[in-house]
Image (tube, helix red, strand yellow):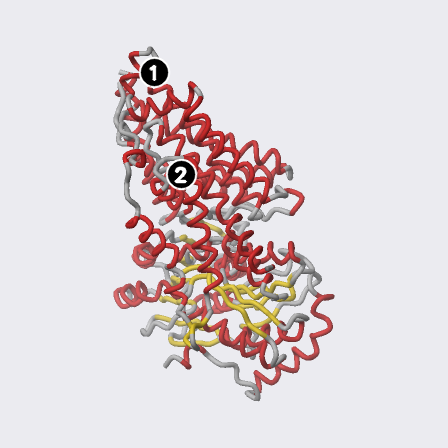
Amino acid sequence: MAALNFRILAQGIVVGATAISIFSGCTKASDSNGGESPAAKTSGLTIGLVLDKGGKDDRSFNTAAVVGSSQAAKEFGLTIKDVESPDDTAFEPALRTFAERGLPLVIAIGFGQADALKKVAPQFPNTKFAIVDAVVEGPNVASLMFEEQEGSFLVGYLAGLATKTNAVGFVGGMEVALIRRFLMAYEAGAKAANPKVKVLNNFVGITASAWANPTRGKELALSQINQGADVIFHAAGASGMGVFDAAEEKKVYAIGVDSNQNAIKPGRVLTSMLKRVDTAVYAVIAEVVKGEFKPGLRSFGLKDKGIDYAVDSNNEAVIAPYKSKLEEVRAQIISGKIVAPDYYKSKK
Amino acid sequence: MEFVTAFIESILRLSIPLLFAAYGGLISERSGLANVALEGKLLISAFAGAAVAAATQNPWLGLAAGVGAGAAGGWLFGALALYSRADHIVIGTAFNMLVAGLIPTVTRSWFGVTGSTPQLERSARLPSDIGFFVLAIVIGGLLYWALRETRWGLRLKAAGDEPEALRVQGVSARGVRLWASVLAGAVVAFGGIDLSLCQGSGYIRDMAGGRGFIALAALIFGGWRPVQTGLACLLFAAADAAQMLLQGKSVFDWVIPNSIVQIVPYIATLMVLALRRAGPAASAPRAINRPLYK
């Protein structure tokens, strides 16, 4: 009898585990209602946010998207529903579910959702879609692209100025074109500042798990430090936490990415290359609220501060000697006097 | 010279989680309990360790919590697999899925985020990599000795090879397997804690990154024997360290594509497995995954 009960329990566990992983992963929709008091002006709209695999607390890319949407929620009295996808196959059902509920705007975070959105968007002409980091054509789709090469060139220039060993490093997450774009411009920037500099580069992996492997991120950073690197830029999602740990232990400098990561190891982070996904997400939500949504490509760069580098109390002191030179280079990139090499264009 | 020492250091660091997971797997599998749940045990102990260290700012409490979570996970997995008499592989898979789903659910209510703990300061982390490595080697040595010389070791092997013989002696083979699973969970836990509290600085969702499965491969490759399994872990770690160094290097001006470099560890694994001659002593415990009624 006892054995029988255990069998039932075991079967229950199998079913339960499956259910939990589905619920926690695919359909973990959460409400974050911005209008806290009922008296607040409420437009009553609900916006859907489909996050990339790193999850909303990756302290980087997805976190930025959540920050931007919650700010919009607060200001316009919206409800934000967000979903985290455990893998690529979950994107399409997540987008579809939001669209079927008749939400006015669904935002897809990350290039991985491009294929799914290409299928879903034409089927829901009354829903507006936005995607970050990929171009999807359609009368109801806005593609939010960033000129990562401009910011990467700038932080590469900073790395080239700051290195004392004439060697700097780059740790990428998953090896994809987007991250190659960071690397190519970073290398060019470092060489522009210091022609003698050697740029080491490593990638954590070739699958999506490369975004969540801090132990390997640290090992790669340690290997670069051992080869002489004293400034390391990461574009590796949560794996980048290992890069910060290595920089702290070996007393070298790290450069953060996407969100402002200066506070992770104050004084050891030279700066963070900001990719203002929050601004872009906020802007597209604001357009929909005001009924001014425009489909098509929009590009954010240094010019409109969609790409920027972070200066705050955590890195003021370490970045001070290079700041005026950096501002000069920034102005030259904006004016077109310096053209940061673009991996996307070089591959076409 | 400095280059060589750094390379060896890298191998040792990379081998730590593999060694603990493989030795945990060895204890469990030699008792006849097939264990594909090593990944889940790495994750749950890494998480419990980091969560408690984050809450108390005391890494030693984190260590205790991680080992406790690993042992508890081992008990749960063992009890379900043994007393339901279900296929161990199925239960192990379910266990991995349960852990993968449970942790984000817990972190959501505990820390308000899905799937990670707050970043830990150095004072809230364990200091020494080398301590973990030495402990792993000591465990390997103890296993080598215990499997030959102690009553516990002989019973463990009997439960895995001839459980009926144990019954004749009046010993419950199921009991032996269950306690082996608890001990296995505690041993694997050190690997998880190394990831989140020593080499890393907090728990990140799915941070084990398949190391539990690589450890299982090392265990099989090592023929379920402590010394060979340890060497297999070191070999896999060396292949991994080598691929990290080879990334971006060029041969006669031709830069080797990273996608080729990064499959080096897998090619190494396949080649070694293909070349290995399975001797009689190098095969799986005979009664592995066999259901027991007593």
Q: Chain letter of disc 2?
A: B
Choose top left, top right, bottom left or bottom right for residue B165: top left
Q: Residue furthest bottom?
A: A337
Cα separation, mark 1 vs mark 2, equals: 24 Å
Q: Chain letter of disc 1?
A: B
Judge the density around disc 1: few (<14), some (14-19), many (≥20) Cα neighbours within 10 Å: some
Q: Name the residue rendered at 50%, 33% in the picture.
A: B139
Residue B112 visible at all: no
Question: Mark 2 belongs to which amino acid?
Answer: Leu
Residue A128: x and y, percent?
36, 67
Residue A306: x and y, percent?
54, 72
Decide: marks 1, 2 in contact (CB < 8 A)? no
Residue A6 visible at all: yes
| Front residue of this view, candidates B32 and A148 | B32
| Front residue of this view, candidates A336 and A209 | A209
Q: Name the residue rendered at 40%, 72% in the picture.
A: A143
Q: Mark 2 = which residue?
A: B38
Residue A339: x and y, percent?
53, 85
| Front residue of this view, candidates A42 and B196 | B196
Residue B56: x and y, percent?
63, 36
Q: Name the residue rendered at 55%, 74% in the picture.
A: A151
Judge the density around disc 2: few (<14), some (14-19), many (≥20) Cα neighbours within 10 Å: many
Question: Are dots 1 and 2 on a single chain?
Answer: yes
Choose top left, top right, bottom left or bottom right for residue A334: bottom right
| Front residue of this view, candidates A340 and B162 | B162
Q: In which quarter of the image is the C terminus of chain A?
A: bottom left
Q: Which numbered marker is on residue B172?
A: 1
Q: Name the residue rendered at 38%, 51% in the picture.
A: A86
